[in-house]
Amino acid sequence: MRWLQKNFKVIAIAESFKLEDGFAVYAGVLARRDGLVEKAAYELATLGGTDGTEKALRIARALNRPDVHMVMLGGCIVSYYNWIDGETIWRELGLPTACYLFEKPEGDVRAALEKLFPDWRERWENISRLGPSVEFAYPDGPKVYVRSWGLDPRDAYRAALLSRRYGKIPEPLRIAKTIAEAARVFLEKYRGKTTPVIL
């Protein structure tokens, strides 16, 4: 895709959570491929819930502009078997959307759903619609696993490759993950306090 040759802009969305919290922090950034951030947004999603797509879509809508080229998701099966449906984001916003994993997907998701959730059939139907990931290898060796909607998986991989600066995670996603973790720690530290937090 021609726009991949330029300093294209993306909306990158990543999460951070602890099981005991009962929620996950989703952070999104509007960033250039080199990681220069122009805008950020947050949402809270339910651990083990079904609101992942809705919360990610809220972030994407808040950050969307005419000069955005794609949405990068730091995972699709998230927040203790919540999920983010990239096809919904693509169809709602008209933005090519790609979901990235940086470790080989493991485990039997269906078996876990059966064990954990009474509504596992509905959950499995939604999660299985995400489809299988496609494996790619960076030139220096690390693997990346890609699902994509509205663009070829090879172009989604290429977007990740062109966005790397440190390690294997594309810079916009690395930044989104970093600020999601910082926000979660902040909320954890001040949860239950009745006095205002002055920054």
Image (cartoon, rainbow, N blue to C red):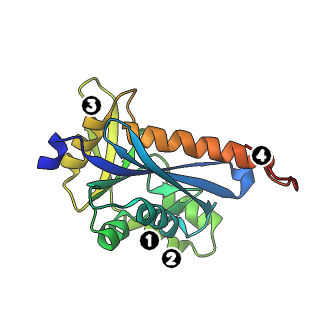
Mark 3, other Cα within 10 Å: few <14 / some 14–19 / many ≥20: few
Residue 37 in percent (x, y) is at 42, 42
Q: Residue at x 51, y 42 (%)?
A: 177
| Residue type of the residue flagged with mark 2 | Glu
Of label 4 and label 1, which has the lower sequence position? 1
Per the image, the residue denoted by label 3 is 138
Residue 129 vs 9, above or below: the answer is below
Nearer the viewer's eye, disc 4 or disc 1? 4
Label 4's element? loop
Numbered label attached to residue 198: 4
In space, the residues marked 4 and 3 are separated at their CA atoms by 44 Å
Residue 126: mark in rendering = 1
**Would residue 197 appear left or right of 195 to someone viewing this image?**
left
Q: Name above or below for residue 141 compared with residue 33.
A: above
Which residue occupies 37% across, 61% down? 64
User: Where on the picture, by quarter, is residue 182?
Assistant: top right
The amino acid on which the numbered mark 4 sits, given as a three-letter code, is Ile
- The CA span between labels 1 and 3 is 30 Å
Residue 92 placement: quadrant = bottom left
- Residue at the image position 36 percent from the left and 67 percent from the top: 89
Q: Residue furthest top?
A: 140
Tell me the residue that label 2 is attached to: 122
Q: Amino acid at mark 1?
A: Asn
SS of the residue at dot 2? helix
Q: Earlier in the sequence, mark 2 or mark 4?
A: 2
Query: x, y (%) of residue 178?
Result: 54, 39
Q: Please report contact status of discs 4 and 1: CB closer than 8 Å, yes or no.
A: no
